[in-house]
Amino acid sequence: MNQRDSKNAYYYVTEISTRWSDNDIYGHVNNVAYYSYFDTVVNQYLIEHGELDIQADRVVGFVVSSSCDYYAPIVYPQKIQAGLRVNKLGNKSVEYGVAIFLIGEEQARAAGSFTHVFVNRETGQSVDIPQRIRQALDMALMAGEY
């Protein structure tokens, strides 16, 4: 990603709280915390819009790839938002575009991708994306025509 995305490039944006433990010895949020924010926005979207039941569903998404480009630091207790869009949608997998914004700013502080492969919880075998989740992903894909 060569340039910072703006917030309007994302279909779904939600507020996430930074935590004291997110800061590292250098005085800013550590890179590991960004992946937690990405995981949070993706799963929150799937729960709210795809009716994902993280405790009981037989099909779940496993993260198989993720990346992040950092543009400017954030620090606890700054208020942040996480953005989500669908970059690519296959039969068994989805690549999300994800980003972190300071509230009140339009340019991403960090942005990357996050890929889920959907699997049978018991067997670990990849399966087709459940229809209700696919519908939610289709909405985020079609809206991603930015």
Image (cartoon, grey):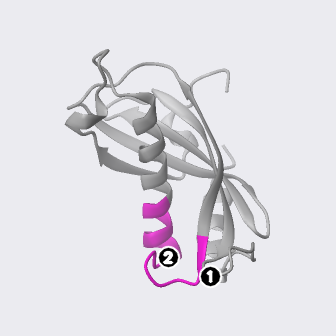
As drawn, which residue projects farthest toward the front?
Answer: 123
Mark 2, other Cα within 10 Å: few <14 / some 14–19 / many ≥20: many
From the viewer's side, name the closer residue of 45 and 19: 19
Q: Is 102 left or right of 60, judged from the image as shown?
A: left
| Region of the chain picked out in magenta, as a range | 43-60
Quadrant housing residue 86? bottom right
Q: Residue at x 54, y 52 (%)?
A: 11
Mark 1, other Cα within 10 Å: few <14 / some 14–19 / many ≥20: few
- Any mark on residue 137, and which? none
- Disc 1, SS: loop
- Amino acid type at mark 2: Leu
Does residue 45 belong to the magenta stretch?
A: yes
From the viewer's side, name the closer residue of 52 and 105: 52
Q: Is residue 96 above or below residue 46?
A: above
Nearest to the eye among marks 1 and 2: give it. Answer: 1
Residue 104 horizontal/vertical position (percent): 31, 32
From the viewer's side, name the closer residue of 35 and 25: 25
The residue wearing badge 2 is 52
Q: Residue at x 45, y 29 (%)?
A: 31
Residue 3 horizontal/vertical position (percent): 62, 21
- Amino acid type at mark 1: Glu
Q: Residue at x 49, y 76 (%)?
A: 52
For the residues labelled 1 and 2, the Cα–Cα distance comes to 16 Å
Q: Is 102 left or right of 21, judged from the image as shown?
A: right
Q: Is 106 left or right of 137, judged from the image as shown?
A: left
The residue wearing badge 1 is 122
Q: Residue at x 57, y 25 (%)?
A: 4
Residue 53 horizontal/vertical position (percent): 46, 79
Q: Is residue 20 above or below residue 74?
A: below
Q: Is 30 left or right of 49, judged from the image as shown?
A: left
Q: Pick the quarter of the image with the N terminus.
A: top right
